[in-house]
Amino acid sequence: MKTINGSKLIILDGGLGSTLEETYKQDISLTPLWSAKPIQENPELIVDAHLAFLRAGAEIILTSTYQCSRETFEQAGYTPEEGIQIMQKSVKLADDARKAYLAEEGVQTTKTKEVFVALSLGPFGSSVKPPQDFDGFYPPPFGPKGPSEVGSTRLFSSSSPSDGDGNSDVVVEEEEKKAIEALAQFHLWRLRAVASNPETWNAIDYIAFETIPHLRELRAVKIAMAKFESDDHHTKLGSEGVGRLKGLKGWWISLVFPEGEGSVQWGPEEREHQTRSLGLDLTNDPSQSEILSVVLDDEVGAVPTGFGLNCTKIDGYLSILSSIVSEPKFVPGVEKGVIPLTLIVYPNGGRSGDTFDDLTRQWVNDGRPRLDGRNVTWEEEVVEVIQKCRDEWKDVIVGGCCLVDPPQIKELKEKVNKTL
């Protein structure tokens, strides 16, 4: 763990799913569970992949639970009870890898913890067919329409009836609330599934809500965490607390911008996109500067300890982050100049033109060159982002997402140690 200007900089791992596919030749791209598929079939591969990232320098490893949910377990032929056991097993595999690595390094695990495990939880879109991690076209009750209806731009506001007095906004807000509640229950089931086993829960250090595609689900995650934190089993382990959960965890929300700063689900065109979130302001289009306000608003739900971007091309990070924090005077706690959150940066790897095809579940290259014409490596650009953003945030966690394998994490850590 490195300290820069009094702030911590922690190295996260890379893309577990893409590493299982590319390095370990696992055929998982078209399966409902993706990186969770080997948990039952080839658990040793999960441990090996975690170990490869740890040996490369990662200090946080994400569990193979990104695509785990009651819905995806059903698609894969498992009962909810079996799904819960699989999620708990995934955490155990990550913990086993941590213990094996610390043993290799000669670290006594009972005295110090140099490696952290983060519970990976993807968006509801990862359970939809075709997957909607990026676009967020969610079927009712999770949203106004499903991915098969994307040809229309009608939203809650234009397709909903009035309340009888001609006031459609009342119905809009009610439908939006129902969608947010449905999404909150989706995430809450997964949290409680893992926490139902104290040993599993106590092996986790962080919770990572990843690839969140719009404000509606961002709010839902905050509500789910507020409900989860109010569960009566969250007491600190004491002399009479054997079998209880060891308090709460640090947790982060990470957003996705598949088209960079201009991603329609976050920008001013959101009114013409099905993923528009309502309820904040029904008369004005939401802007990117609202995002951080929602994240830090304790009236919306629980406030995370971290915020970031993942599964997004690195060349858009600086402009996206600048847009998100462009109006700090409206953000609670930011007027002093430092955002009271850990910044999590884990962009996709690959070439500048690599994009993900939701239908084939494959990465393709569109031939797009860098707009600035520069010839820089992925690692160099990630470090540039950290250099320019680190003073605005409490701490920094940095790693990689899809197409970032252990050798790249090793190069990133070496670059961080040399430059920062």
Image (cartoon, rainbow, N blue to C red):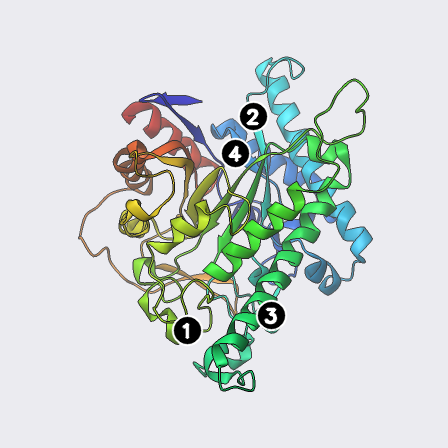
Lower sequence index among marks 1 and 4: 4
Q: Quadrant of the N terminus?
A: top left
**Amino acid tagged 3:** Lys
Lower sequence index among marks 2 and 3: 2
Lower sequence index among marks 3 and 1: 3
Give me the disc on residue 155: none
Q: Which residue is mark 4?
A: 53
In this rendering, is residue 68 above or below 179? above
- Marks 3 and 4 sit apart, C-alpha to C-alpha, by 30 Å
- Marks 3 and 1 sit apart, C-alpha to C-alpha, by 19 Å
**Amino acid tagged 4:** Phe
Q: Position of residue 30 (x, y in %)?
A: 60, 63
Mark toward the viewer: 3 or 1: 1
Q: Nearer the viewer, residue 398 or 48?
A: 398
Q: Which residue is mark 2?
A: 115
Q: Which residue is mark 1?
A: 273
In this rendering, is residue 413 above or below 276? above
Tag 3–tag 4 contact (CB < 8 Å): no
